[in-house]
Amino acid sequence: MKNTGSSSGATVWVVLIAVVVFFGLFRFLLLGGAALLGLALAGLLVWLSAGFITSRTRAARQTAPTDDDADDEQPAGPRWSGQPSAEEARAAGASNMRTAWISWHLRSLPRPEESRDARLLTGTLSVVPQADWDADRLRQHGRALWSLRGSARRHGLIDQVDARLDRVVAMISDATDEEFDTSLGQVNDQYLYHPDRAVRTAYLEGGALGVEHIMDAVTAARAQAREDAATRAAAESLAKQRTAALRALRETRRPAEDRDARTAWDEEARKLEE
């Protein structure tokens, strides 16, 4: 009986130890398997990334242009930014001078409008500046024109806008005693102090061309003002003649038999001209 009880107790202990070991191994395998699975996934991602980077690098090397190809694709003129040609410097000098002249007389240049509606542009151009406008009204019109230059370029009206802008600024120049300092039109250090003497010289020549453009704009504005004044005087004279002729016609209730209404009109107009 004692041997039977001893063997039964040993069996229970063996079973308990086996259960503990089983659960321990199961837990170890569960946690360790998850860790191994995570490491495997991480390794797979690293391997795929390395392969992708390698393929992109190989493709870039195959498609990259050689030095000879780069020379063929390089446009004529400067080979990189910061090395402008003499033509670019001359154009920049003229543009800088004109912009400085406009900014000086308008006192401020507004930001360009982003509107793509052409009606705003055509409406602004339809407003013709008059000789009796004061400087403030001319400046207001000039700022409106400047803000619409981007829209004018899109609609092919940039030449008309710039011509009107030159006229308005020239009228402001004549209407005020403000003297424009031409040194304000040559402040671009990129060209003014360029290492290449030809670029510096071209920039200064462009400034001189800008001054000539300003002088031409002022001369044209004055000629236009004289022409407008003459047209206005002629229109007023014609209006007076027509009004007098109509008055004479109204007063002549029964014209003579050999004279109709149009003859009376013409005779009255002739008298006024004499």
Image (cartoon, rainbow, N blue to C red):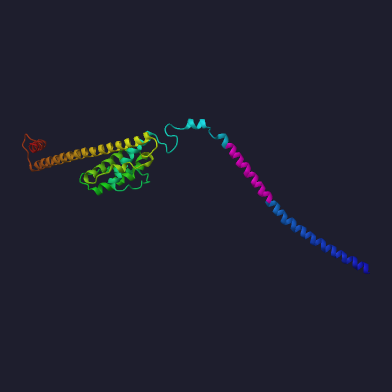
Residue at the far bottom: name it: 1
Q: Quadrant of the N terminus?
A: bottom right
Task: Give the residue drawn at x 79%, y 62%.
Answer: 20
Quadrant in the picture for residue 124 = top left
The span shown in magenta is: 39-59
Task: Give the residue drawn at x 72%, y 56%.
Answer: 31
Task: Give the residue drawn at x 8%, y 43%.
Answer: 251
Residue 53 visible to an observer of this rendering: yes
**137 or 273, nearer to the observer:** 137
Q: Quadrant of the C terminus?
A: top left
**232 or 223, nearer to the observer:** 223
Residue 87 visible to an observer of this rendering: no
Quadrant in the picture for residue 35 = bottom right
Position of 2 with respect to 221 (left or right) is: right
Taken as a whole, is the magenta stretch helix, strand or loop?
helix
Position in image of residue 5 (x %, y %): 90, 68
Task: Give the residue drawn at x 35%, y 38%.
Answer: 92
**36 or 151, nearer to the observer:** 36
Position of 127 with respect to 10 (left or right) is: left
Q: Does the magenta stretch include residue 42?
A: yes
Q: Is residue 147 magenta?
A: no
Position in image of residue 51 (x %, y %): 63, 41
Q: In this view, does 28 lie above or below 48?
A: below
**59 or 122, nearer to the observer:** 59
Position of 189 with respect to 234 (left or right) is: right
Q: How many marks?
A: 0
Position in image of residue 219 (x %, y %): 23, 37
